[in-house]
Image: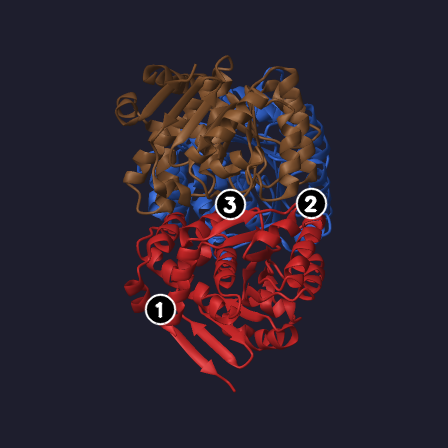
Chain colours: A brown, B red, C blue
Amino acid sequence: MKEKIWKQISEVRTKSPLVHNITNYVVMNNTANALLAAGASPVMAHAQAEVQDMVNIAGALIVNIGTLDEYWVESMELAAGRAKEQAKPWVLDPVGAGATPFRNQVLQSLLKLQPSVIRGNASEIMAITNVPGGTKGVDSIHESVDAVSSAKHLNQQTGSVVCVSGAADIIIHESRVVKLSNGDPLMSKVTGLGCTASALIGAFVAVNPADPFLATVSAMAFLGVAGELAARKSAGPGSLQLNLLDVLYSLPQEEFMSVIRIEEKNEE
Amino acid sequence: MKEKIWKQISEVRTKSPLVHNITNYVVMNNTANALLAAGASPVMAHAQAEVQDMVNIAGALIVNIGTLDEYWVESMELAAGRAKEQAKPWVLDPVGAGATPFRNQVLQSLLKLQPSVIRGNASEIMAITNVPGGTKGVDSIHESVDAVSSAKHLNQQTGSVVCVSGAADIIIHESRVVKLSNGDPLMSKVTGLGCTASALIGAFVAVNPADPFLATVSAMAFLGVAGELAARKSAGPGSLQLNLLDVLYSLPQEEFMSVIRIEEKNEE
Amino acid sequence: MKEKIWKQISEVRTKSPLVHNITNYVVMNNTANALLAAGASPVMAHAQAEVQDMVNIAGALIVNIGTLDEYWVESMELAAGRAKEQAKPWVLDPVGAGATPFRNQVLQSLLKLQPSVIRGNASEIMAITNVPGGTKGVDSIHESVDAVSSAKHLNQQTGSVVCVSGAADIIIHESRVVKLSNGDPLMSKVTGLGCTASALIGAFVAVNPADPFLATVSAMAFLGVAGELAARKSAGPGSLQLNLLDVLYSLPQEEFMSVIRIEEKNEE
């Protein structure tokens, strides 16, 4: 599977897909830079007067509710609705699911528009599936493994590929489960690397819309390996944010292959 | 007092308070990263449909008017009103006070909601108390000492701890005055380090709501020392932004103790 | 001309003009930091209740439509209208021109308010002048030279100085044409360096409102040289973003003079 994943990384670099982001204010700069470093072409647009037109020309859409409000929610629904109509892949990032009733309502409404992929931390994935007792703002208080049954339930209910990210990343679709064990604890001290993950999934699903599971695994593996390598040379979270972009930009195949830690399970 | 301050820094690191920020677009990424580096857990949320719920679960609220508009002002008032109802600490950052009549009106309205702490540069603190002739957009054209009488007046009028930040940071509450003399001139060339100061005050007041004066002194000392140490190894403002996060993340007690410059006065 | 350009750079550093930005969420932090590093004093403000007041006290206005929406467009028109009334210089950055009908309509409306300078990439400048077949979101798919006739047409139609930026930067006003050939390909992998260019033009035109052509050439030369020098010591786009700020802050005259590559043409 490692070769397949590397092929996806190469295709993002060469095809440079246009990725439309409706995302939060905190991470817009980072996610745009991560998409550029990975070879993609990001565009951020949220106006109700143009989001559908932007979806029309993009390869994929990311909807991230991190700093949602009433206007932005309408834009998200317009954009995701258009993506659904056109069978264009779109990624849902349920930032802060469970933190407020408003976020929960918005997420239920967005789920009806059938995201191709849902990526969240363990607390967020558990909150979407109504497991009680679970969130602290936008940071997870659970391990990825805690959310596996929620993720399976969510996949069955929606048909979306579900990715639980954290110290381990677990990607689930029907009987397929992949666990990735790269990354570094320091990554949780840089804001929005989860959002960056969702943005990268958008780039990968844009070049491979037929296989959103492989696209998600590839994006998460790319970010995990790059983050792990970047952390090795970082004195703290400030350096890590910078080094991560440098590594995403230049990571060679050989290094990727030697660092990736992946486990596949087929539960059929 | 240095030992007391270090204890606050340790508590933020270990308790990881949830800090709710309604802040400006320019600095959201930095302030989230600074809060994470200091050990806190930041959340940014401004929707009128959820700000009160977010205040309910947060340890403290920061209201920063840097890129305010009519919608956001209503959100700020809802959130600060809820904080007041719940006697939960909240910090007001009056960015650009005096620059436009709109900012001045909004600030008068927010002051009625009794912030626990007000932190601004000298020009901003003077503008709030109607000292004429004072601001240039969002940058100060005065020294901190110029604003001491304004700060005392503001403290008497509101009961809020008042912090004037700049080359020297002066923190005032009733008869207590602390002056901190750390930092580096290069810090004024990185956008939003004042906003970062306000965000850190939020983290400190969340773990010590009973003593917002000590919390404010501790946050300002932490940022001043970290900024000074970071500047020593920075080739310019780009490196400083990064190094500051690394130092906030890893600053050891011994180094903090040897670098902090603090003067206390009790004017009773 | 190199001496004249350096004089502009020095004047921005010493006069520290207040530059009012109505710009996009992605780049606000970077552009504020670039303006500070160059010596200017940035302010970001978009509220309809204050944009005209902010234009009143600023030296120049930048209008960047990168993440426009209906509310922001009204603010942009209010602010640009006030700048026109006061004959105060303002810069239009037509981010994503051609990507959606909404952007095109907004741009036609803003052009009527007579920007002093228009800066875009080749695809954007071609899209404004209705050359078909031209854009991919916000990234250019053309070389600067492809847009020269569009830029001349746009200059004739509006009277604005027109700058096409890219691997080469071409600045056009009436019979005057300047071509700058600094920079580095890595700069296209950092989001928003075009937006940074527009912001810097704002700072330069604020200190030299009588000659927006020289101001634009100077800003673009400064950024191109700084970017080229910063790229030399950067391992990727993450480091470049940081190093660029350091170089803008500290670039000495001698180094600037030895690195700048400029060609002037007078086509009268």
Residue C42 on image: x %, y %: 55, 51
Q: Which residue is drawn at 51% across and 30% down?
A: A150
Tell us which disc is closer to us: 2 or 1. Answer: 2
Tags 3 and 2 touching, CB below 8 Å: no
Determine which residue is flagged by label 1. Answer: B260
Whole-Å distance between the Cαs marked 3 and 2?
Answer: 27 Å
Residue C186 on image: x %, y %: 39, 30
Residue B155 quadrant: bottom right
Query: Quick one: SS at disc 2?
Result: loop
Task: State whether residue C154 appears in this view.
Answer: yes
Give the camera-side residue of A104 and B155: A104
Query: Quick one: SS at disc 3?
Result: helix
Q: Residue at x 31, y 26 (%)?
A: A261
Same chain for mark 1 and mark 3? The answer is no
Instruction: Give the chain letter at badge 3.
Output: C
Kindly identify the amino acid type of the residue bearing the numbered disc 3: Asn
Same chain for mark 2 and mark 1? The answer is yes
Determine which residue is flagged by label 3. Answer: C29
Q: Which residue is drawn at 57% across and 63% down?
A: B89
C90 relative position to A14: left or right:
right
Determine which residue is flagged by label 2. Answer: B49
| Quadrant of the image containing the N terminus of chain C | top left
Tell us which disc is closer to us: 3 or 2. Answer: 2
Task: State whether residue C1 appears in this view.
Answer: no
Kindly identify the amino acid type of the residue bearing the numbered disc 2: Ala
Residue A47 on image: x %, y %: 67, 32
Whole-Å distance between the Cαs marked 2 and 1?
Answer: 43 Å
Neighbour class for label 2 at 10 Å: few (<14), some, many (≥20)?
Answer: some
Query: Quick one: SS at disc 1?
Result: loop
